[in-house]
Amino acid sequence: MSDEWYLKITRVSDGYLLEYPNDAYSRVDNPDVSPLIQSVVADDEDELKGGESLLWRVIDHFELAGDRYDKERLRITREPGDKYVADTVIRDWSHDQREDISA
């Protein structure tokens, strides 16, 4: 791996464009090998999923993930917002005015 660690992230219409040094470039004498690697991270179905994928790529690129035996490690989680209210209606049956059918 080279000593040059960087990751350029550009927002594009279909996700994120990542650009970073190609470690293989310095080890080969081949004009077809690019000094940079470019890849797009996207998820057309779910924008948050694309964001999660981007964050995992950043963590992997800089080798920050750790493993299950480490004292601490990074994690990416998805959870509802603090003020999110689901679209479903939950009915409170305790105040239901039912007919008395015992009569």
Image: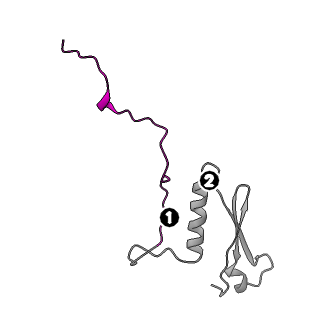
Determine which residue is flagged by label 2.
47
> Which of the labelled discs sits on residue 31, or is there none?
none
Element assignment for label 1: loop
Q: Quadrant of residue 72?
A: bottom left
How was the colour assigned to the protein in this rendering?
A: one colour
**Residue 89 drawn above or below residue 56:** above
Element assignment for label 2: helix
Front in this rendered view, residue 25 or 54: 54
* Name of the residue lying farthest toward the right: 31
Residue 100: image location, x then y, percent: 24, 17
**Residue 47 drawn above or below residue 10:** above
> Which of the labelled discs sits on residue 76, or is there none?
1
Judge the density around disc 1: few (<14), some (14-19), many (≥20) Cα neighbours within 10 Å.
few
Q: Which residues are magenta?
A: 74-103
Residue 97 located left or right of residue 31:
left
Considering only order in the chain, which callout, 1 or 2, is on the residue closer to the N terminus?
Answer: 2
* Name of the residue lying farthest toward the bottom: 3
Q: Give the residue drawn at x 60%, y 50%.
A: 46
Front in this rendered view, residue 64 or 100: 100
**Residue 101 drawn above or below residue 72:** above
Report the quarter where the C terminus lies: top left
What secondary structure prevails in the magenta region? loop
Q: Quadrant of residue 1?
A: bottom right
